[in-house]
Amino acid sequence: MFGNRPQVMPVRTPQVLWIELSSKCPADCVFCSRALRRGAGSNMPLPVYEELIGRLSRPRKIVLNYSGESTLHPDLVPAIRSARASGAFVELVSVLTTVPVTMLDSLAVSGWNRLTVSVNFSDQNT
């Protein structure tokens, strides 16, 4: 303690992470830099992701998003479960245009805490 103030100690690892599981995306939003920065994109290997999650010390929030569409990752459901097992609040951000109907049931019970649907993608002709 310094005077009446508690001592503030840094945490060992970040507590809030935004993770890009996939840099692939079928949308071509005018504001997005994904294609310029990532080209056709790729998926993060699940072992790399799980090692990252395993090294976190008490994460508060993990957001699966960035310039790609996480629903294109073949191991999305296991990735969500790994994030939840860390104790973190898990948010999935998606345009939901790429989710196969066969994936909906397993995705719905995968354990995410919040689903944020991005409505930035639209077709001007509709």
Image (spheres, helix red, strand yellow):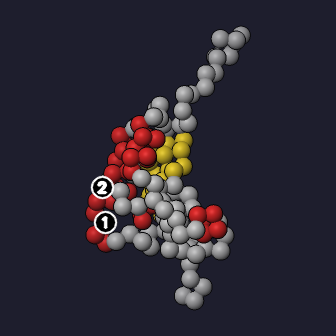
Position of 77 relative to 28 (above/below): above
Q: Quadrant of the N terminus?
A: top right
Residue with the most extreme bottom position: 125
Position of 47 relative to 32 (above/below): above
Percent across and percent down for residue 42 are 48, 62
Residue with the most extreme right position: 3
* Residue count near mark 2 (Cα–Cα under 10 Å), binned few <14, some 14–19, many ≥20: few
- Which is more toward the observer, 40 or 126? 40
Image position of 41 (left or right of 54): right
Position of 50 relative to 71 (above/below): above
Question: Mark 1: which secondary structure?
Answer: helix
The reply to whether residue 111 is visible in this rendering is: no
Q: Residue at x 43, y 47 (%)?
A: 49
Position of 119 relative to 8 (above/below): below
Percent across and percent down for residue 28 are 58, 75
The image's mark for residue 109 is: 2
Q: Amino acid at mark 1?
A: Met
The image's mark for residue 42 is: none
**Which residue in the structure is indicated by mark 1?**
103
Q: Earlier in the sequence, mark 2 or mark 1?
A: 1
Question: Mark 2: which secondary structure?
Answer: loop
Q: Residue at x 42, y 65 (%)?
A: 72
Q: CA distance from mark 2 to mark 1?
A: 10 Å
